[in-house]
Amino acid sequence: MLIRNAEIYAQGVADLRLFQGRIVDIGALKPGVGEEVLEADGSALLPGLHDHHIHLAALAARRSSVLCGPPEVQNKEALAARLAEPGMGWLRGIGYHESVAGMLDAGTLDRMAGDRPVRIQHRGGRMWFLNSAALDILLAQSAPPPGLEKVTGKFTGRLFDEDGWLKQALGSTPPDFADISAELASHGVTGITDMSPANDPEMAHHFHAQQQAGRLLQHCLLAGTLKLTEAGFDDGLQLGPAKLHLHEAELPEMESVISFIQTAHEQGRPVAIHCVTETELVFALAMLEEAGTMPGDRIEHASVTPDPLLAQIARMGLRVVSQPHFIAERGDRYRQDVEVRDQPYLYRLKAFIDAGVSLAAGSDAPFGKPDPWASMAAAISRSTSDGYIMGVDEALTPEEALDLYLADPVDLARTRNIEVEAPADLCLLDRSWTEARKRLSAEYVRATIIGGSVVYDRVDQSPLQSRLRIEAFA
């Protein structure tokens, strides 16, 4: 394929030839006999975007789930209305936050929806709330796990860190990725890093099968358990970091964490540690200091990072993967829930870059929206949905914001560029970068190319009118 008259990001206008999944030539090029030609019309051509932190299976499952938290659901009455929607069988809720109706239990859910089994996931991703009907079904299939809370001899319906048990008791299979993959392609996303901590060889097999069937278009770096090394990998599905998910209320034993880090390093894998509170970050850094670090070790979220901890991250050579859009999506809630003294340290960006820390971004979908352009816009504006500017000194330029999604997924310190021999994974906009940078938006994505093939082609006009033309020259 020949891409003609493209404004190559940070380089200038040129033609590109793609062959066997790679960029093989850049310059003033003529189409070959029978070669497909994509007319870029002088629009910006970017390296394909990479979402560095996503939970693909949970995002796919979200499509068949009921939203149970802010901003859609703000109080107990609204939650009850959502759960009263007609239907049979399991009702799966997601996105719950205790600001709606406190920490739910089986009794509360029974009063809202006692005639069908209900399971609701906390937006933090580590906790489920079950009603009595759900408990009866699950416990009939499997013995209660340690994470199923029991008070005065009775199960409360609160399930902590037991996704594996829940999956087994439900007898569920991983979801199809086709719709989610197509949506990501429409945003110019050509690669993902799946950060689900329970990813194991069985899930790796599912990812591979989805790619082979054309249901998952993106390249994937798969993080997960220590056992993930037992799975088979290839160029399209690569082994990623070992994921450690901390929770401030129940931090693991120090010895087990040190052993986890060292085992991952022996496997040749960096670790990715979930840190959404200052306490979790302090604990993670202490464990890494004790266990030792390797290139690629990373902190996920770094939600609250005071200056001394930021300096420690820089000194240790750690990478950080942030969610800039959480300021836009959750900032007004943070203003209510987070102590005033900590608010300047929420989802810092510019300070990391200035300190020399390799910084990238990921959606954390389904816990955030899977739109990288909205995330870039939030990184630039630092505005909450109500218009409050949170951490103005952390704002990035459009180019810095874009770079968060151009980092090499295997080496976050390296920014991917359009060059000969680079993978033919590209995002074509419908305008120049000079125009696009004024208001970054997914609306501007005109075509997405993965492995040299067009996987997304926005057709918003008739074929004769469309500015995106793929022609065959005889």
Image (spheres, helix red, strand yellow):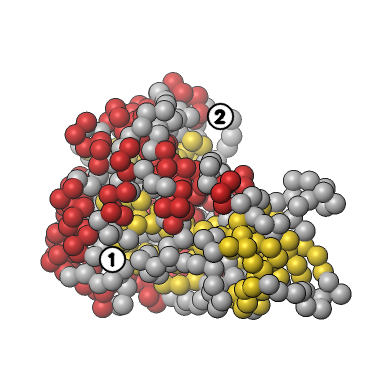
Viewer-proximal residue among 236 and 131: 236
28 left or right, relative to 328: right
Quarter of the figure that contains the N terminus: bottom right
247 left or right, relative to 382: left
Residue 335: tell me if it is visible: yes
Q: Amino acid at mark 2?
A: Glu
CA gap between label 1 and label 2 equals: 45 Å
460 left or right, relative to 100: right
Tally of numbered discs: 2
Q: Give the secondary structure at mark 1.
A: loop
Q: Position of residue 407 (x, y in %)?
A: 42, 62
User: Mark 1 near mark 2, Cβ–Cβ under 8 Å?
Assistant: no
Counting residues from the N terminus, which is met first, the one under dot 1 or under dot 2? 2
Q: Give the secondary structure at mark 2.
A: loop
- Residue pictured at 45% horizontal, 72% vertical: 238
Q: Which residue is mark 2?
A: 85
Q: Using the rendered view, name the quadrant where residue 380 is placed.
A: top left
Viewer-proximal residue among 408 and 201: 408
Q: Amino acid at mark 1?
A: Asp
Marking on residue 297: 1
Viewer-proximal residue among 240 and 2: 2
Quarter of the figure that contains the C terminus: bottom right
